[in-house]
Amino acid sequence: MKRSMLTRGLIVATVSMAALVLGACSEYRSSTEANSPAMVDHAKTEAQRTLDMFRKTDPTLDRFFKSAVGYAVFPEIAKGAAGIGAAHGTGVVYENGQAVGTASMTQGTLGLQLGGQTYSELIFFEDAHALNTFKASETEFSAQASAVAAAKGAASNADYSNGVAIFTSGQQGLMFEASVGGQKFNYTPYK
């Protein structure tokens, strides 16, 4: 009986991971396609909707918008796991309030985790060094990195860590695990 349940669990985990990987691959676009005028306009529109949602959810985020040299907004990150997890999303990078490029985020995790979810993520860059490191595609959050869940007043107690402040907002799904550790980013400037 236990062996049957274990086998069934492994099959479910394998099928879940395959579906997640195939879904992430279907979202892949070359940097040329991602920077086409239609895709840029769509990305900016979705990013603005997401920024409006974050601002409405927590007006105290305003201090980050005023002080940060830049920020990256990911309107939708899809994440799934069954022991082994993966996540992917694309977003828009802003410098001094102007959209300057796109970024993709990938994440792989291993450990006690189960489920799937979609969420939005907003990353503020405290100074030019933090932003330039991100734009050089050298930003990777450590396993200890954590994000603040967007809620009214949550940003009033939040602060930068290693030059970044990270906020997330759940959209749908249920996930037994909630870290941003292991996230890697790839930046592509607009042409």
Image: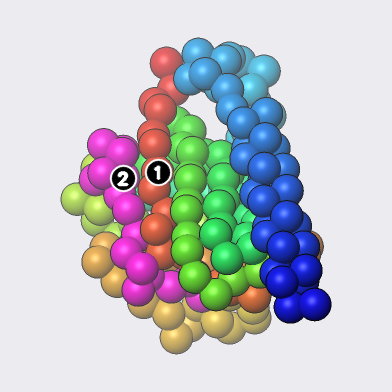
Residue designated by label 1:
185
How many other residues sit within 10 Å of disc 2, few (<14), some (14-19) or many (≥20)?
A: many
Residue plotted at (64% across, 75% down): 176
Majority secondary structure in the magenta region: loop
Q: Of helix, strand and loop, which one carries label 1?
A: strand
Q: Is residue 181 visible?
A: yes
Q: CA distance from mark 2 to mark 1?
A: 7 Å
Residue 116 in picture, x, y percent from top left? 71, 61
Disc 2 + disc 1, Cβ < 8 Å: yes
Horizontal arrangement in the rendering, residue 44 relative to residue 128 (left or right):
right
- Frontmost of labels 2 and 1 is 1
From where the camera sits, is residue 94 visible? Answer: no
Q: Tell me the number on the disc at residue 134.
A: 2
Q: Is residue 10 magenta?
A: no
> Which residue shows up at 67% across the image and 51% down it?
14
Q: Is residue 163 above or below residue 5?
A: above
Q: Position of residue 1 (x, y in %)?
A: 80, 77
Reply above or below: 111 against 34. Answer: below
Task: Name the image quarter holding residue 141.
Answer: bottom left
x, y percentage for residue 191?
A: 42, 16
- The region drawn magenta spans 133-148
Q: How is the image coloured?
A: rainbow
Disc 1 marks a residue whose amino acid type is Phe
Amino acid type, callout 2: Phe
